[in-house]
Image (tube, rainbow, N blue to C red):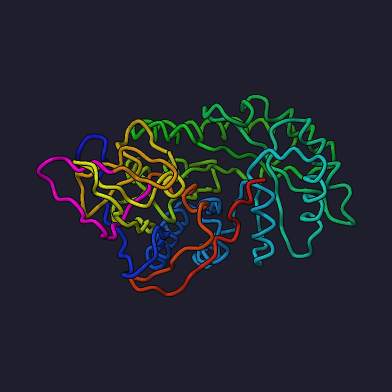
Amino acid sequence: MTAGRGPTIVAPAVPAGLDTPSLVIDVGIVEANARRLGEQLRARGVALRPHAKTHKSVSLAGIQLAAGASGITVGTLGEAEVMADGGIDDIFIAYPIWAVGPKAARLAALHDRTGLTLSVGFDSVAAAERLAIAAGSSSGAPPLRVILEIDPGNGRTGVAASRAGAIAAAARNLGLDVLGVFTHGGHAYRGAGAVASAAADEVHALTVATEQLRSAGIEPRVISAGSTPTALGAAAEPVNEIRAGTYLLGDRIQVALGGSSPSAVAIAIAATVVSTAVDGHVIIDAGAKTLTKDMPEYLVGYGSLPAYPEAVIERVSDYHGVVRIPAGTQRPALGEVVVVIPNHCCPVVDLFDEFVATRGGVEIGRWPVDARGRSG
């Protein structure tokens, strides 16, 4: 392993003859990943509710559910609508939706769907008030199920655990069904050295928040932690649910953080070398509109080329990936199709209408990215 490059990743096999750039996902690896984490969590008595924002695919969510997932997590109303339309009947929107205007009407319509079990995140009394008003416009539906977000040190959304009882009680008094509490250990993404402490932060915050709810007379049914790097570390009392997402596909960041093994990455980009005009570099047809500009400080380059481990994608513009080839190392030829492992799979998937579904390098179909662009 070279500093900044992370462990060498075993790239999934890519079929020959693809138009490029193409998004390729090995369904066999996906199925193995879905089974593995599900079995690991079941052994701990913890449910898995995977986050579908990673893949935005009804078919891939179906694989997760078939492997024993208790339901799915989404980040937006749009994702929830697509997944519900696709027949998924247990959905948690892990986001503090501000339910006014069109969002209030859309939430009410989802809440009123027959056969759909819906729950929604919140982190303030004001947001709970708007959720209650929106849900109250549903015709004869039961109380809206809500889960209070707790900040475990990520510094994004969520309230301090010490405030959980008062806010949950206020939501209950508005007629909402308060299921429990959830966290996102996103500060694990600061680097491999932050993963264990972020998992411990989630467990601690949820322990305090659970005690707070009980002191307010609310028995939490859902005590949920969530991120791929902290999935196993946070699967400890009192946590009873994990909401990992990226584990299903893997990427360079997850391999660097230990959230995915180098042989469990299911996603790849097929790209063509379109220019060798500049000495010491080749240009591929996968730029920022394919690979994105995600590059954490602990990685070098905007993706990796497993067949050319010394190559560095050092710059991306919209449709160009500028790959530096160190002197004395092997270089791809003009016109060659190369396999690229992206740094962060979630935004990459959202840039494609479909992906090439494969098993062991053999194409089995073109599957839609059903919730592509449904960011609100």
For the residue pair 184 and 284, the one nearer the viewer reads as 284
Residue 82 placement (x, y as % from top left): 66, 59
Looking at the rendering, which quadrant does residue 23 occupy?
Answer: bottom left
* Residue 361: % across, % down: 32, 69
Q: Is residue 29 left or right of residue 49?
A: left
* Vertical comparison of 155 with 33: above or below: above
In which quadrant of the rendered view does residue 180 lie? top right
Please state the extent of the stretch shown in magenta in the rendering: 323-342
Q: Quadrant of the C terminus?
A: top right
Residue 98: horizontal and vertical position, in percent?
75, 37
256 falls in the magenta region: no
Residue furthest left as drawn: 328
Q: Residue at x 48, y 31 (%)?
A: 201
Please give the count of numbered marks on the rendered protein. 0
Left or right of 102 in this view: 152:
left
**Compared with residue 189, is residue 333 higher up or lower down, i.e. above or below?**
below
Q: What main secondary structure does the magenta stretch of the protein show?
A: loop
Is 225 displayed left or right of 91 in the figure? left
Q: Position of residue 105 (x, y in %)?
A: 82, 49
- 339 versus 281 height, above or below: below
Q: Which residue is at a point 26% across and 35% down the rendered structure image?
A: 4
Instruction: Compare residues 287 and 359 and report the one nearer the observer.
Output: 287
The residue under the point 57% across, 37% down is 183
On the image, which quarter does residue 90 sit in?
bottom right
- Towards the viewer: 218 or 6: 6
Image quarter of the N terminus = top left
Q: Is residue 335 magenta?
A: yes
